[in-house]
Amino acid sequence: MVKRAIHYEPDADESDRTFCGTDGEFEQQHFTAWTAMVTCKRCRRILEKKIQARRDAAAVKSKSTQWDWLSARALELGYPSLWDAVSDLHVIKGKPPLAEF
């Protein structure tokens, strides 16, 4: 007997459709709101894309927050811009500011 795939559905109690669009008749036991318990390949692919998009958006936000913090710190130290602080660091350390890139 073939075991049926478990589909992702955030509102599993009120749903009669699948997240991935698979047709068929499903019972309550074929749905779950827990992403770790999903066995449907289509649902997993869709979830992975959504999770990756969310991570990418968080990374961009994190990078901009870090940049803002660095810029504010350079202004606190008396530099007119972040690049002036980086060039002074170059003079102090003796390395090009972006040598590894």
Image (spheres, helix red, strand yellow):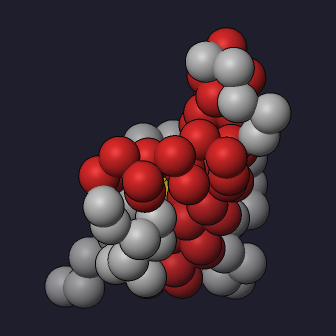
Where's residue 15, x and y in %? 73, 46
Q: At x 35% / y 46%, what residue is drawn?
A: 92
Q: Quadrant of residue 14?
A: top right
Where's residue 43, x and y in %? 54, 72
Residue at the right extreme? 80
Q: Nearer the viewer, residue 31 or 63?
A: 63
Q: At x 29% / y 52%, what residue is drawn?
A: 93
Q: Is residue 50 visible?
A: no
Q: Nearer the viewer, residue 35 or 32?
A: 35
Query: Position of 50 compared to 75: left or right?
Result: left
Q: Eyeballing the image, is 58 above or below 6?
A: above
Q: At x 25% / y 85%, what residue is drawn?
A: 2
Q: At x 77% / y 40%, what residue is drawn?
A: 81
Query: Position of 50 compared to 17: left or right?
Result: left
Query: Position of 2 compared to 34: left or right?
Result: left
| Quadrant position of the N terminus in the picture | bottom left
Residue at the left extreme? 1
